Amino acid sequence: MIDIEPFSLVILVVAATVIVAVLSNRLSAWIRVPAPALFLAAAAAAAAVFPILGAVPAQVDERIVTVALIFILFDGGMHIGWRRFRSAAGAITVLGIVGTALTAAGVAVASHFLFGFAWQTALLIGTALSPTDPAVVFSILGKREITGRTGTILEGESGANDPVGIALMVSFLAATGTGVDAVLGAVGQFALQMVVGAVVGFAGGWGLMKLTRRVALPNGALYSVRAIACAALIYAVATILHGSGFLAVFLAGIVSGDGRAPYKREIERFSGGIASLAEIIVFVVLGLSVSLDDVFNPAILWTGLGISALLIFVIRPVFVGVLLLPIRLRWGERAFVLWAGLKGAVPILLGIFILTAGAARATTIYALIFIVVVVSVVFQGGFIPLMARLFRVPMWVVEPEPWASGLRFNEEPEGLHHHTVARGSPADGSTIEDLNLGDDGWVSMINREGRLLQVRGSTRLQAGDIVLTLAEPDAQLDRIFDASVDPY
């Protein structure tokens, strides 16, 4: 008889870890410490007590975090969607590409001149710490959701700068030698990754939409599985073609995010659940793989704290702040975007890349990344709710709605439109009778904070209302319910 008891113990430990991580979100709200910080601390402590937990090869950690990041970026792209992305495409592109490069350069210069690192090591540190992670911000805000362009720019910047940061790191690690030839080689590889990743991402997102709409499956649960599998396929194709697989899955999520498709809600919920699990896994991997002896080495610890302070108070405010000047935001919203550039999953992956590549001083760099991520999550993250109130960032409270009442159709309902009233949109503050829905259009349902409202001509809409309309299939109603903004 096969002895399965040892494997059962592994399942027990993994399941218990996931359950504790999920429940820690309640503890996080109670003690006002961001949940990712709890994951990090618990994993690092466990690895210190049981060293065997941290004995996993770096190559295995790299593969685990890579798979996790595929699902995190795909879900992030779906959450933004094409309409929101298009409304701030210029800002997202500039912050994601130029902002990432400037941040990496700023950290590299500081690491070289202030902390004495060689240029190659300094560039690796700067590149690893350039991406941001909005998932940490939103997990800290809990029920509160940022509305308008601020939320779109935060999510879009991170979704864009994650692939850019990864592509920069891969290019630097692949470059051999020094001098002009090495720099040109790295720039060429970076450009190739961006172009190929963008093409595969747009094509893959379009193909996923068509596939979901036109190829029916016998079981509704399979639609979610197919979407996740397609995300992995898009990543693999882009990577094999020497493109950025992470950029490809992010763009595929954006392109398919707004598309009308059967079982769309189920796909979004499944993707969100997988992404949440992936975020937990990434922070646990960082905690297990870091050496606390390196972290608490006084020289490394003070260097990490110094880099953290420069990132928070100097480098991001200066470089990203300049890029935000032409973007149409209130000064408070600009300040919040600058503060909310938290570090998360991608710096962890980039640190693992450095370890597996055998770069000079790799363990020191990894310990520095751990310190910066912890400071960012605990210090910056701890002040996120206060900063949101101080800078009057537009938000609304999204109450949990565990009970649903829905209708199912065999075919796509023609002319049925689902909208969320954006702050500052024509619908915000207007009555139903004031809306220009066309000759045959009308509002059939209004959901406000989880409660149904009676639909009357005098009913006044407000930001955050979920509105169901019946109108001509080609009716352009987005302009009524979305905030009217310039592209940049």
Image: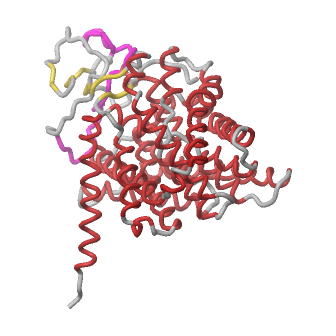
Which residue is painted at 49% across and 33% down in the image?
Answer: 85
Q: Residue furthest front?
A: 298
Q: Is residue 210 left or right of residue 371?
A: left
Q: Is residue 307 left or right of residue 142?
A: right
Which residue is painted at 45% across and 33% down in the image?
Answer: 379
Q: Is residue 329 left or right of residue 396?
A: right
**Can residue 210 be seen in this snapshot?**
no
Q: Position of residue 431 (x, y in %)?
A: 26, 10
On screen, 16 above or below 377?
Answer: below
Q: What range is drawn magenta here? A: 407-436
Q: Position of residue 62 (x, y in %)?
A: 51, 62
- Foreground residue among 353 and 333: 353
Q: Position of residue 375 (x, y in %)?
A: 48, 39
In the rendered image, which quarter is residue 28 located in? top left
In the image, residue 421 lies in the stretch drawn in magenta? yes
In the image, residue 246 lies in the stretch drawn in magenta? no
- Foreground residue among 69 and 473: 69
Q: Quadrant of the C terminus?
A: top right
- Foreground residue among 4 and 101: 4
Q: Position of residue 486 (x, y in %)?
A: 54, 20
Q: Which coloring applies here? A: secondary structure
Which residue is painted at 75% across and 50% down in the image?
Answer: 118
On screen, 75 above or below 98?
Answer: below
Q: Quadrant of the N terminus?
A: bottom left
Task: Say how many tags the image has.
Answer: 0
